[in-house]
Image (cartoon, grey):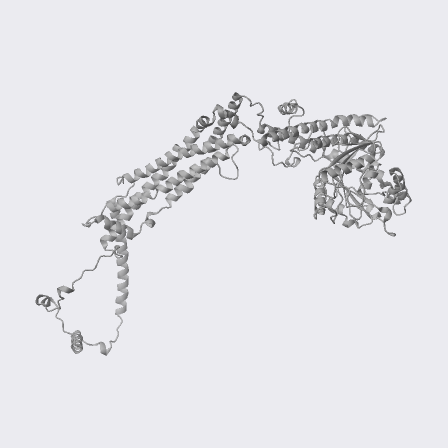
Amino acid sequence: MPERMEDQGGKGIAALGEVLIPAINRVQDAFAAAGGLSFQLDLPQVAVVGSQSSGKSSVLESLVGRDFLPRGPDICTRRPLVLQLVHSAKGDEYGEFLHLPGETFTNFAKIRDEIEAETNRGAGSGKSISNVPIRLKIVSPHVLTMTLVDLPGITRVPVGNQPEDIEQRIRSMIMEYIKHQSCVILAVSPANADLANSDALTLAKQVDPEGARTIGVLTKLDIMDRGTNALAALENKVVPLALGYVGVVNRCQADINDGMDIKSAREAERKFFVQSEEYSSVAALCGTINLAQRLNEILVRHIHKILPRLKRQIEFAREENFHKLQSLGDWSGLDSKSAQGALLLKMLTEYSQLFGNHLDGQDGNLPANEVAGGARIRHIFQNIFVKELKGVDPAVTLTDKQIQTAIVNCSGIKGSLLMPEIPFQLLARRLIENLLEPCLQCARFVCEEMIHIARRCEPERLGMLPNLQQNLRSAVQAYIEDCLAPTEDMVSNLVSCELAHINTSHPDFIGGSQAIATILEHKKGLVERGKKKFEDESQAIRQSMSTPFKMNPQDQTSPSHGLASEQKKRKQDGEPEKQTGWIASIFGGGAKPSPESIYLQEPPKVLRVSETKNEQEELEVAVTRLLVSSYFGIVSKTLQDMVPKVVVHFMVNAVKSGLQKRLVELLYKEDLFSSLTKEHSDVASKRERCQKTLKFLHIAAHTLDSIPRALDQSTAGGTSGQRSTSRPQPTSSGRVPRRVSPKRTREDFPTNENAHPNVSPHKPSQRKSTSGPLGRGLASVIGR
């Protein structure tokens, strides 16, 4: 259990509380009254958490000393109640609602009625809940200064018009408050239930597993079963918490019905602990008065601890919103045509420069995790177009049958005696024609990429002028597409030039004689390898024939004997004996067909070349293939070099250099000024919210900056009879808080998706007043 503070230390904490807590409350009220801000500030406060009927409302009423909360058998707290307790030395006692500014309530029964009415206005008259808080300030000489948030009690079974997931909704609402490190959790649990199953402690453990910012409160100690007590829990031995536990005894419903006031209830509570044998050892640490002192001390120390981080958070948010406001621009003075024209010309010029920088790779906003800008166009040239053309192999594209067919067709009726040239030109042109489509595709790919680049390099401010953005996109796309037409014409002309003249005198062309020599040399090598193979096989045959073997007696017949036998067999079969040789041809010894039996075979409808080729045909095919491959490689390399140059000259550079002129011609017209400079409907509201957020951040910063000066005065005045000191009181760790904020890190700031990309979170703030540029900018914003 934490040690009790001495009287002098208690006075110091009280002095701190009189300064810190009201300052935080003023900041809370300012932000709550603003509403709809684009920035949420996590300010220190105490969230009261507990299950339904755990005694939360009774604890809060005991701390205030008044009956002011709605009561009943069902759920009563259906909206968060932010309760600001302010100690008043003058003896005044009243309440104020933030939604009723200027109206005070001295009758606490009317405060209860207004809480019920405001709850019904926000959450309905049934049993449903709402996460919109009610803010109530109670000023009284009987309270210590602190801020409490009464949250709906955790329930499990929906009643009335409550939704089926009422338990999950309440838990989610509670988590939204207690998840922040700036929140102190007051976990209320009944002592007559198992502490290990406490709903309040279960939720607190999820966000504060070490119990560093959770203080436990045990209620209903007076109605526990006989023979049982909560001494072990109060001594922090059951579910340990760094801030320990405080036991309280509240009024029961019978006491409330009998009209027992809070003062009598506190006295009965004191007697219970003093006279109890079980709790006499911890009586000095229990009771509502001790709970109030503990909460005040804990909240003050907590505020004092996180105050430097809170200041840095506010300062960072001011810088962030200031730059965001600058990005939104202030176009409220664009009523005149001259102002509208100046803005339009400025944005057209800015856009043209951004587009050119994006293509040249000089834009500082290019992404770091992907290839973008002009580098993508280079990727199209090198990794798509050139790579594809290098992969085209005429040896694979042309088959021997196609080449031989071309040679036969070009020979015509006469045929050819020497190597024909026409088949080479025919096949070369056919392959070159196939290169036209990929060359045109390259130009189209670059066109599409430039349109994509044009979209990506649009300035953020352009999105605030929807008419200008739409017309600008259309104009840029049309201009790029207009430049595509001459680019495609030039690419087509390049291919047409290659088709118009087959330059066999090109220095890199292999030539006919060299091609024949190459083929013959290659064929000679094949013949020599074949000859060597034939000799090796013949040698193997001779070696095998040197082995003696016996002939079959039936095979030992002379050739003449075999011929006679064959002739004899034919005579026996009745076949006429044919005369052969030149005598038969002269004298007609052979059988002559009659003239009526001569017929020619009809030519086929589709005539194809023979599958087998003689030596001449093989040579012609090989030489033609080599010539075509050589010349195609020359043309392919030329196009690989020239097509990117044509695309860059006729499209990329043309668009980059002439874009601004074209946009001015199309859009810079006086009759379009009003339409093109008209803001988006959301921009004005965003600017207004940003200005409003800046205004209240400025108020919060000045409020927190005034704390050290007020703290010095309060400390000096609050310790009468002692030597005054201008230094702040030490914290619980014994350290004196520094006036200079340490260097900020990313962990010191909240995550904000709308952060401006040019604002560095690690950049330390160099202004402490409104004398600098940021201060003057903020002052002008607040002045508006």
Can residue 621 be seen by looking at this rendering?
A: no
**Side of 699 where 517 appears, left or right:** left
Asked if residue 407 is positioned above or below residue 27 in the image, the reply reads: below
For the residue pair 247 and 520, the one nearer the viewer reads as 247
Residue 307, by quadrant, is top right
**Side of 516 where 695 appears, left or right:** right
**Side of 577 where 159 appears, left or right:** right
Q: Which residue is drawn at the image coordinates 27% and 45% (left, top)?
A: 426
Quadrant location, the N terminus: top right
Quadrant location, the C terminus: top right
For the residue pair 99 and 303, the one nearer the viewer reads as 99
Percent across and percent down for residue 39 are 66, 33
Residue 498, by quadrant, is top left
Percent across and percent down for residue 350 are 50, 27
Residue 601, by quadrant, is bottom left
Percent across and percent down for residue 641 are 36, 37
